[in-house]
Amino acid sequence: MSWDDLTKDELLSRFLQMEERINELEEKLDQKNGRIEEQNERIEELETRLRKYENPHTPPSKRRSGTDESPTSQDDEDDDVRTDGGTPGRKDGHDPEWHSTADLDEEIEVTCDCCPVCGDRFDESVGISPRLVEEIPDPQPPEITRYNRHYYQCDSCGTETVAAHPDCPDEGQFGVNVIAQSALSRYDHRLPYRKIADRFEQLHGLELSGASAWHATERAARAGRCEYEQIRQEIQDADVVHIDETGIKRTYSPAAQ
């Protein structure tokens, strides 16, 4: 049936149906454009994160693996904000601080004989790509030394004397390095005695009990007692002494009066 055969009412009905259909299509188009706009914003946000986390100057702790969930934009902002309100890193105007590398202990030539793809043999290298690697040695086993301390008796007065060695402690079976490391672990690293013993076993395979670690720190204290007393006497005799004004809470007790 052609348009010429339709009546006026039929034409009006067809026109209203077409207008309603056009409105539906325009509404769907607006929704689709809205989704496309949201997707473009999301793509731009992800590209910004990708440039941030795959930057070669970004530290490994800031990088994210491809399997991790992408953090929200608020999380990205929180990564660069400290709890005290500041920002990480040195302040503007300060000189950068670079890691200084010590002198080389060993240099190893790393070569390759053939191409890993086609198997063709190489004639000679066309250059060197150096890489400095700093490593700590494997756990060192303890050294066990027996000091045969000879003792003597004076023919005149009968006094017995035992020969001394600077590396041989006056008491105990642990050397000066064990004593010093025990004291450092206790007072510098704040480790309990049980963990000090675990540390010696992990690093050196040295079996040490918590009580032995405590005795080692006590020997270190006794060894430095003379110098400690000397420093204290110098402080007491000084004309001016700097003080520590750090506050400390004290509980008032009427019973103490």
Image (spheres, rainbow, N blue to C red):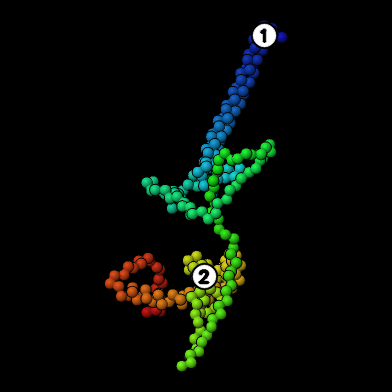
Of the residues under marks 2 and 1, which one precedes in the sequence?
Answer: 1
Residue occupying image coordinates x 53% and y 39%: 51
Identity, as a three-letter code, of the amino acid under mark 1: Trp
Q: Which of 244 and 107 is in front in this view?
A: 107
Q: In which quarter of the image is residue 36?
A: top right
Q: Position of residue 115 (x, y in %)?
A: 66, 39
Amino acid at circle 2: Asn
Residue 119 visible in rendering:
yes
Q: Position of residue 13 (x, y in %)?
A: 65, 15
Residue at coordinates 63% horizontally, 21% vertically from top-left? 21
The residue identified by callout 1 is 3
Q: Mark 2 points at which residue?
A: 177
Tell me if residue 160 comes above or below residue 4 in the rendering. Answer: below
Q: How crowded is mark 1: few (under 14 residues within 10 Å), some or many (20 or more)?
A: few
Provide residue 4's location: percent of width, then percent of height: 67, 6
Marks 2, 1: nearer the viewer: 2
- Residue 38 badge: none
Residue reaching furthest to the top = 4
Whole-angstrom CA distance, mark 2 to mark 1, is 107 Å
Quadrant the N terminus occupies = top right
